[in-house]
Amino acid sequence: MKKIINIKKAKKFIYLDNGASTPIDPQILRLLSRTLNKFYANTKSIHQKGQEAKDLLEKSREGFAEKLKTSPGEIIFTSSSTESNNLALKGVINFTSEKKHLIISNIEHSSTTKAAKYLKDLDHEVSIAVADKNGLIDLDHFKSLIKENTLLVSFNYVNHELGTIQPISDIVKIINQERKKRVKEGNKTPIYLHIDATQAFGHMPINIKDMGIDLLTASSHKIYGPKGAGLLYVKKGVKIKPLFHGGEHEFGIRAGSVNLPAIYAFYKAYELALQRMKKDDQKYKKMKKLIIKEITKKIPESFINGDPKLQLNNVVNVRFNNVEGETLAFTLDYNNIGVSTGSACAINSISDSTLFSIGLRPNEIQSSIRISLGRFTSQQDIDIFLKILIKCVTNLRKISK
């Protein structure tokens, strides 16, 4: 390890794992501190402080509704995307006592796959739509999975490991065709579409009215807001069973006192993300192009996973032959650079990885790392990262011989 240790470290920690979680934006942190100090009452209390808190909660809800082009009554605040995904799947499928059919893909986040497994254990039927080598859901295969009792389809908008953007409009068309078919056949079973937009939120424009979806998940800590806040859009008329019981918060769908400071900070973080979206995306596009160019040019036997043209600009998933990804991640960390070896929620399981689902071999998965850029990533950070990455890969390969 001597040659690796002798690599000149980055002077500051260069954080390139924004796909797992983002730092709180300083202005959002200041706002969060003020909100924690001032709005401490329960939003269900009838006194002045309680009503002030309630007003701020509804201001946040109305703000999200306006920006997402929906109505305030369709926004349910939760603690995270994980809770929102669980509420969407379990809430819809378990609303009736009848056994229903659920479709997810083989590249979903673990909060979706584990919720689906839970429902399968309750004797509901679960089908898995496959993705191609780039992480795009095979639409023909998905269409073939739909049955007369299919109640819910749940897909991610942007994959958490590759950054692949799914063709939501095409998926909606298939759902709408099935709806027309059911009306014609007299089948009264509804079919709903849930989109996990956790990785897309704040990076892509989202207009729920135009999208034609029924449920949508988003999270605060992916867009430079605090942890502890998420949301679930539930279209009016979609029947959903609560996960928690013991309170009438969130229209009776999500019991428990709301985390108002985090929710308000979440809303303001989204507001800021929309303002910065175009500017930030242009920066990511330039950085991603440079990263791919330098890696493929200067590191032999390196390969980009998936098609960069089908991905968000802030994600690069790359593999290096004859280098163990986890060792590389630890070596980069020693040199003050943070990357990941995949989704932070599935880091210990190859079979849970998107890379496994799209056909990569175990050794290829184990040699991959994910680089996810963020608002505070500078060009200097990327220049330093690339220099250190090249040295680390070179030295690791020498050691492994």
Image (cartoon, grey):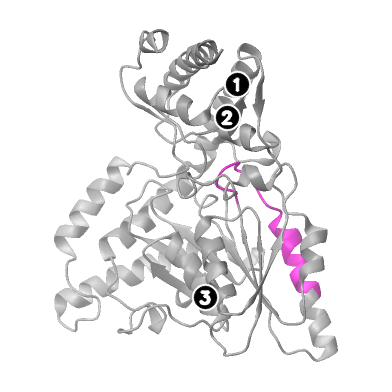
Tags 3 and 2 touching, CB below 8 Å:
no
Q: Quadrant of the C terminus?
A: top right
Residue shown at 30%/48% (left/top)?
28
| Rendered image: mark on residue 90 | 3
Distance from label 1 to label 2 (Cα)? 7 Å
Task: Give the percent coordinates (x, y) of residue 20.
Answer: 44, 44
Judge left or right: residue 169 versus residue 286. right
The residue that mark 1 highlights is: 322
Q: Which residue is mark 2?
A: 367
Which mark sits nearer the N-terminus, 1 or 3? 3
Q: Is residue 329 left or right of residue 291?
A: left
Callout 1 amino acid: Asn
**Residue closer to the observer: 204 or 172:** 172
Q: Residue at x 45, y 47 (%)?
A: 273
Q: Amino acid at mark 2?
A: Ser
Q: In this orientation, which residue lies closer to the viewer: 376 or 300?
A: 300
Residue 342 shows in the view: yes
